[in-house]
Image: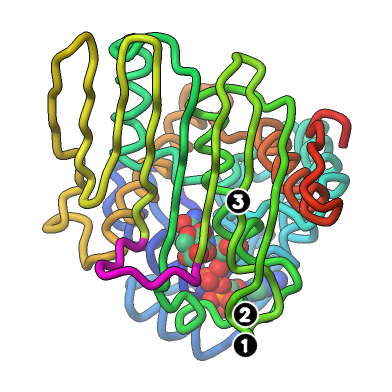
Amino acid sequence: MLNGALIGCGFFAQNQLRAWAEAGDAGIVALCDRDAARLAATAARFGIARTYDDAAEMLARERPDFVDIATTVASHVPLVTLAARAGVPVICQKPFTETLAEAAELVETCRRAGVKLMVHENFRWQAPIRAVRRVLDEGEIGQPFWARIAFRSAYDVYAGQPYLAEGSRFIIQDLGIHLLDVARFLFGEVTTLAARTQRVNPRIAGEDVATMMLGHAAGVTTVVDCSYASAQERELFPQSLIEIDGARGTLRLGADYELVVHADGATRRETVAPDEARWGPAPWHGIQHSVFDIQEHFIACLRGGREPETSGADNLRTLALVEAAYLSAQRGGAPVDPAAL
Ligand code: NAD
Ligand code: 89Y
């Protein structure tokens, strides 16, 4: 059994703790939060007796097998550095850091300390996205040449995560980051990115709409578009809709996780929904199972001495896409080479 410690008992940590509670050979034995009420409520909810208001003290006393950092971005640099100095393998929530330079430094700090580091970049672990990747890997639609990854919603994310309304950066850094990571997961590295952003909701500080066009080294063109200002007849949060055109046919991941593959003149349909009975309540069941899967992946990597898919080093490339998007938007949509950042 691997004993973990978790820092940050806020909104999303509840999902992570639920997933840890279901894990077979790993679990969380100690919790830390600077907010006493949140710490106590979370400890009671998950039956975790050992609690701390100071992360350094927790790591020193508990000597855990790993630490799961579930705080918001501003605290990631000091907390990941602390874990590296304590020699404790670490999972850190996205966005990993606010700047690429900070991220590169953390990756180097962990490398030098010999500490495994995974960024909790869970969207690529969603069952429908894994199903899309299988279709591509099996060559069902031939060589892909065009794709769209869309997330358009009016779900009130500010109710559960009020800080999302406050930062000068919003949707690309918070949500687009997942979609950009999925684009990399499906089609490989990106050599050019052009973006346009908009703010529709006047009560927030950052952008709530972004439209990005990516050119991949493999030749695919991907449109990644996201919005939290799009009220539709049916609210599909948190579903990502995916369209891919390939040399032999097309793939569509539509509403309610319906996957349609049309290739060589024949069509097949499959529902690739996460099981709501197991991962509910809706709509977060769409995310919850991916949290379980990424955590299982981390434990398997710790046990097997492997690098996680979304290691810190890998995540530098996703963060470079985020930076490229903001830079392109600032330059009126001019294309940016993420490798040059
Ligand atoms: P939150 O503000 O609700 O919770 C963060 C908690 O961390 C707070 O309780 C705060 O007191 C605590 N904290 C902050 N710094 C600390 C420190 N140094 N020591 C101890 N405790 C500290 O935030 P949230 O909504 O839970 O978001 C946390 C992270 O999860 C964010 O980075 C967010 O982007 C991410 N998130 C990811 C997903 C996903 O699907 N991967 C979904 C939602 C949120
Ligand atoms: O914070 C975001 C995330 O990572 O997934 C959805 C979310 O909770 C709101 O955009």
- For label 3, the SS is strand
Instruction: Give the foreground label among 2 and 3.
Output: 3
Callout 1: SS: loop
Q: Is residue 229 magenta?
A: yes
Q: Nearer the viewer, residue 283 or 109?
A: 283
Q: Which residue is mark 3?
A: 211
Residue 208, given in percent of the width and then of the height, sits at 59, 68
Instruction: Specify the color scheme.
Output: rainbow
Question: Which x, y percent locates residue 204?
Answer: 64, 82
- Which range is magenta? 228-237
Q: Is residue 70 visible?
A: no
Q: Could you say which quadrant of the image residue 319 lies in?
A: top right
Q: Are marks 1 and 2 in contact (CB under 8 Å)?
A: yes
> Rounded to the nearest whole Å, what is the CA distance between mark 1 and mark 2?
7 Å
Labelled disc at residue 241: none
Q: Residue at x 81, y 31 (%)?
A: 337
Question: Which label's residue is closer to the chain start, 1 or 3?
Answer: 1
Q: On screen, 288 above or below 235?
A: above
Res. 165 mark: 2
